[in-house]
Amino acid sequence: MLSFQSLVLLIALASAAMLAWNNWRAREHAERLARETCKRMGLQFLDESVGMKNWRIVRDADPRTGLRKWAIRRVFQFEFSRQGSDRWPAELILLSGRLLGVEFNLISDAPATTPPVVPRHDTTSHHVNDSAKVIPFKKPPQP
């Protein structure tokens, strides 16, 4: 017969193994969803893998019954490319295996425009309200 400590240890090991297996299945599912999403959007799925950013247990309403239940919300990271020479991060969010969304963190790769031209102060023309436009620089207080 098993002692109480042995039984608790056995339950803890079985729970850890079940959680690891569940996380492995969720990662495979997220990888498949990321690949399909990139293909559908005409993007290149880089490294052919996703990595788990974080996970947490949340309360979620079941879409079929409306009852609130406990669920695991997982966020996976992956990278994609638009032209093949760039690399952009993205996140995929799963809630109990259901896709909540994919966030592509795109930043415009268009060349930077020339910096805005700041007009020089014209000393020949005198405006009465020019001093109202000036914000004096104040030195920050020293700790």
Image: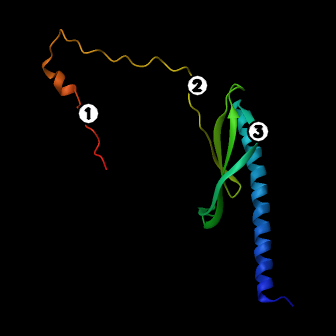
The numbered mark at residue 90 is: none
- Determine the residue positioned at 17% across, 10% down: 125
Nearer-the-camera pick, 19 or 85: 85
Residue 22, above or below 138: below
- Comparing labels 1 and 2, the label whose residue is closer to the camera: 1
Q: Amino acid at mark 2?
A: Asp
Question: Which residue bears the numbered disc 2?
Answer: 109
List the single residue furthest toward the right: 1
Which label's residue is closer to the chain start, 3 or 2? 3
For the residue labelled by badge 2, is the local secondary structure a helix, a strand or a loop?
Answer: loop
Question: Which residue bears the numbered disc 3?
Answer: 47
Q: Amino acid at mark 3?
A: Asp
Nearer-the-camera pick, 67 or 141: 141
For the residue labelled by badge 1, is the local secondary structure a helix, a strand or a loop?
Answer: loop
List the single residue furthest toward the front: 142
Question: Which residue bears the numbered disc 1?
Answer: 137
- Determine the residue positioned at 72% across, 42% down: 34
Do labels 1 and 3 touch, CB within 8 Å? Answer: no
Residue 74 placement (x, y as % from top left): 66, 55
Location of the N terminus (image quadrant): bottom right
Quarter of image, res 91: top right
